[in-house]
Amino acid sequence: MSILKEFVYRLRGDYTTEKLIKMGLKVGNNFKRLNGVILDPAHCWLITIGDNVTMAPRVHILAHDASTKEFLNYTKIGRVNIGNNVFIGAESVVLPNVTIGDNVVIGANSTVTKDIPSNSVYAGNPAKFICTIDEYIDKNKSKMQDSPVYGEEYTLRANVDNSKKQKMYKELENKMGFVD
């Protein structure tokens, strides 16, 4: 990690994934942590994250709940286990003592208060079952047949140019599309 990025994390009070791992966080391969994700630094050793996990911006993974501190002088704590091939949508919160199975999608702005079984899609506050992962994939494959589909050249990774941005903007009026 660059010195500048490390400085920005420290300035904001964030902890890098590498620092959290040194503190006890367990992380598998191909973990993508987007901007503003908080992995409970006070109890990160209680968090396990599997392979191929993506956390969208501002996801919070909490291994503690301080709601009891004022009244009991103790904070509740619990393990958080996140399986393999999991996507957690932006602004979602995962509370202590929760296990998320393998092959799971959690919709944006969800609050996960209970275990999520493998091969499922959950969303809401509290998060509720939406459909199986197979149903979700089939539904979106079908949508791709009638939607604009864009290659990597339409992404910031490939330095998308203004003409492609404008084309995408125009084609996506009142509809969804898909990008590599």
Image (cartoon, helix red, strand yellow):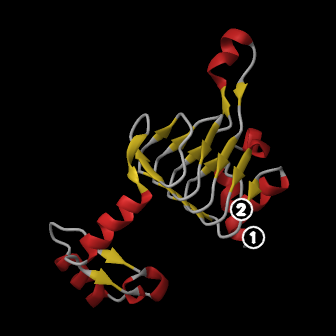
The image position of residue 41, as x and y in percent, is 73, 44
Q: Nearer the viewer, residue 8 or 53?
A: 53
Above or below: residue 64 compared with residue 174:
above
Please, which residue is most extreme toward the top here? Answer: 71
Look at 75% across and 70% down and name the residue there.
3
Q: Quadrant of residue 148?
A: bottom left
Above or below: residue 156 compared with residue 7:
below
Q: Residue tagged by mark 1?
A: 3
Label 1: which secondary element: helix
Quadrant position of the C terminus in the picture:
bottom left
User: The disc labelled 1 sits on which kind of residue?
Assistant: Ile
Dots 1, 2 in contact, CB < 8 A: yes
> What crowding class fits label 1: few (fewer than 14 Cα within 10 Å), some (14-19), or many (20 or more)?
few
The image position of residue 179, as x and y in percent, is 36, 78
Q: Quadrant of residue 32?
A: bottom right
The image position of residue 13, as x and y in percent, is 68, 48
Please give the count of numbered marks on the rendered protein.
2
Look at 61% across and 66% down and name the residue there.
52
Look at 65% across and 34% down and name the residue there.
97
Q: Residue tagged by mark 2?
A: 7
For residue 74, side relative to residue 119 (left or right): right
For residue 12, side relative to residue 90 (left or right): right
Distance from the alpha carbon under mark 1 to that under mark 2: 6 Å
